[in-house]
Image (tube, coloured by chain):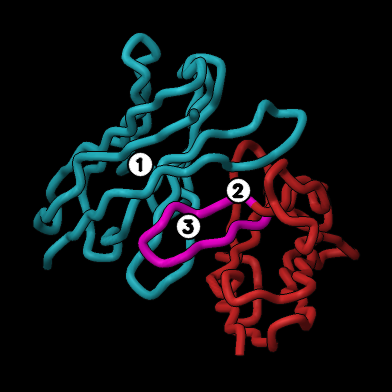
Amino acid sequence: QSALTQPASVSGSPGQSITISCTGTSSDVGRYNFVSWYQHHPDKAPKLMIYDVRRRPSGVSNRFSGSKSGNTASLTISGLQAEDEADYYCCSYVTNNTWMFGGGTKLTVL
Amino acid sequence: QVHLVESGGGVVQRGGSLRLSCTASGFTFSDYAMHWVRQAPGRGLEWVAFIRHDGSKAYYGDSVKGRFTVSRDNSKNTLSLQMDSLRPEDTAVYHCAKWSTGVSDWFDPWGQGTLVTVSS
């Protein structure tokens, strides 16, 4: 497997909630609770939004939440705001000090 | 404030070499393992390499194994990525990122990246 599977795009209106899925296998997402999510605006450094499946770093809005079921992790953004429009990437620890990113999801706030 | 700045990117011909650097500040560099992650034009993020805090061991993604070498100089707060036998598909923005402590798992913060272009 070359990358975790994410939808190419999702969209929502301001105030709505959206969920981005990240599907791996029993060797990565399903095996470890080491899934993290990153927000990436063009020409900026990616920003950590969620780590260890559901933990939120200080300074990240509580509108962002993470979860996992089996081989699929999810990022939910509630109360969508225009500033949330960005690319989002999941990442999972795989094994033996290697990691894998998802293909990325472009979030459009309508 | 934790800060990472990459440098060394540029244009190189297929088969050539390039050395990237990442200068760290705002934290005790020698206490933390580090990553390199890249993003090819129009593509997603791809994990490239990981090096332990003391430089004792390094790990690589399959697409760069045997061609790239990650190293660090803790006395200079600098992380490096030596890239040899470069291919057009190595064209990407290369980011360095600080890793968590091992009990948890995250990449934070990231540098803004340096662009590598491999011409054919």
According to the image, label 3 marks what residue?
B46
The percent coordinates of residue B78 (x first, y second) are 34, 23
Q: Is residue B62 left or right of residue B116?
A: right
According to the image, label 1 marks what residue?
B66
> Do the dots labelled 2 and 3 sit on one chain?
no
Looking at this rendering, what residue extends furthest in the right direction? A69
What residue type is disc 3 on? Glu
Numbered label attached to residue A99:
2
Residue at disc 1, secondary structure: loop
The percent coordinates of residue B48 (x first, y second) are 44, 47
What residue type is disc 2 on? Trp
Whether residue B66 is visible: yes
Q: Front-most of A54 and B42? A: A54
Numbered label attached to residue B108:
none
Q: Is residue A43 magenta?
A: yes
In the rendered structure, which segment of residues is drawn in magenta?
A37-48
The percent coordinates of residue A77 (x first, y second) are 75, 70
Q: Nearer the viewer, mark 1 or mark 3?
A: 3
